[in-house]
Image (cartoon, grey):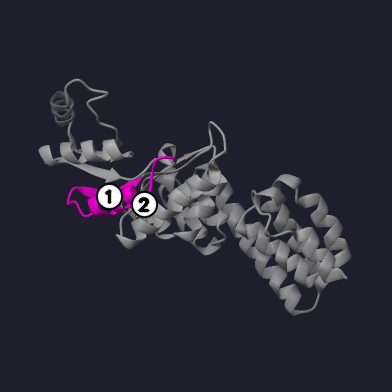
């Protein structure tokens, strides 16, 4: 038996919803979860779920609804989350595919619904298109979403592809212990997978180098610590919490003039625009003065 965990089932798309439900049952799909992601589709999805025992729903406001969602619609969402057929919040998220003009408003709506999901202890269904970094930043503030994903994967430990993705997320947010444990689960199932082995090697090397760097700092061997720290900064993917953490260590513990030169090359203008509150060049200059 199978569960269709995400679909859009509406009279606008199907002439005969009864037939769609019947066809699903005939191919051993035991349950269907519809995502209602606008006011009207939430109402319709709940009506369909009331009619069929094997249909459940997730509800929330898609980012394309950002201009029309007001406080009244948020209260409506909260009230409908009490419905016995509601099993999650979504799909919610960020979509910059057609532009970023309403980026800030999208983030506000997304985080508002993530908070609601935490309050109601419900998992979330994420929509993210051309907005990966902002989506990750939002999720880091509401980490129950990642925990729910982890719990779901633990139900099916053979889903190595998604376990590998989860390990990558843990690297991005700087949780190397969880990254290593999750990556090991992929290797338990597929020990000869070269991609999984390579990512495990990267995680283990970062952990090993971080330990060495801390030891050198404790021994006041800042020249050696500096070289290790530079390698860690170069090794960590993207402009993530882990990269920021190592750069802060570089600022605090190594020769500042050399660090200033190195960081001016390492941190691009685009990186600084993404994280304008943490201006490493200014911090270094002030510290050095």
Most distant residue in the bottom direction: 219
Identity of the residue drawn at 61% across and 63% down? 207
Viewed as shown, does residue 288 lie left or right of 93?
right
Q: Which residues are magenta?
A: 67-90
Crowding at mark 1 (Cα within 10 Å: few <14, some 14-19, many 20+): few
Q: Which residue is mark 2?
A: 71
Identity of the residue drawn at 56% across and 55% down? 171
Q: Which residue is mark 1?
A: 76
Please indicate, yes or no, whether residue 133 appears anywhere in the rendered image: yes
Instruction: Indicate yes or no whether the magenta region holds residue 183.
Output: no
Circle 2: element type:
helix
Image quarter where the N terminus lies is top left
Instruction: Indicate yes or no whether the magenta region holds residue 81.
Output: yes
Give the camera-side residue of 154 and 3.
Answer: 3
Identity of the residue drawn at 81% across and 74% down? 221
Tell me the quarter of the picture where residue 214 sits: bottom right
Viewed as shown, does residue 133 lie left or right of 219?
left
Give the camera-side residue of 120 and 74.
Answer: 74
Q: Earlier in the sequence, mark 2 or mark 1?
A: 2
Q: Position of residue 169 (x, y in %)?
A: 51, 52
Circle 1: element type:
helix
- Mark carried by residue 249: none
Give the camera-side residue of 265 and 89.
Answer: 89
Q: Nearer the viewer, mark 2 or mark 1?
A: 2
Image quarter where the C terminus lies is bottom right
Contact flag, marks 2 and 1 (Cβ < 8 Å):
no
Q: Position of residue 55 (x, y in %)?
A: 18, 39
Please indicate, yes or no, whether residue 197 appears anywhere in the rendered image: no
Give the camera-side residue of 238 and 218.
Answer: 238
């Amino acid at each position: 038996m199978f569960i269709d965990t995400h679909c859009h089932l509406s009279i606008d798309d199907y002439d005969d919803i009864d037939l769609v439900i019947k066809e699903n049952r005939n191919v051993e799909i035991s349950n269907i979860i519809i995502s209602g992601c606008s006011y009207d589709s939430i109402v319709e999805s709940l009506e369909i779920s009331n009619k069929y025992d094997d249909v459940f729903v997730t509800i929330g406001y898609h980012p394309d609804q950002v201009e029309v969602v007001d406080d009244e619609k948020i209260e409506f969402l909260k009230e409908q989350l009490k419905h016995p057929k509601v099993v999650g919040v979504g799909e919610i998220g960020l979509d910059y595919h057609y532009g970023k003009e309403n980026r800030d408003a999208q983030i506000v709506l997304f985080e508002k619904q993530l908070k609601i999901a935490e309050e109601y202890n419900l998992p979330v269904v994420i929509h993210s298109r051309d907005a990966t970094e902002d989506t990750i930043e939002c999720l880091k503030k509401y980490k129950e979403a990642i925990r729910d994903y982890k719990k779901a994967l633990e139900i099916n430990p053979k889903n190595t592809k998604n376990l590998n993705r989860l390990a990558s997320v843990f690297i991005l947010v700087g949780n190397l212990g969880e990254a290593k444990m999750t990556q090991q689960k992929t290797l338990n199932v597929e020990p000869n997978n070269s991609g999984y082995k390579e990512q495990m090697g990267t995680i283990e090397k970062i952990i090993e180098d971080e330990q060495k760097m801390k030891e050198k700092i404790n021994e006041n061997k800042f020249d050696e610590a500096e070289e290790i720290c530079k390698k860690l900064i170069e090794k960590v993917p993207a402009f993530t919490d882990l990269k920021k953490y190592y750069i802060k260590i570089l600022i605090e513990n190594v020769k500042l003039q050399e660090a200033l030169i190195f960081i001016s090359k390492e941190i691009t203008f685009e990186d600084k625009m993404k994280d304008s509150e943490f201006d490493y060049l200014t911090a270094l200059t002030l510290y050095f003065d």
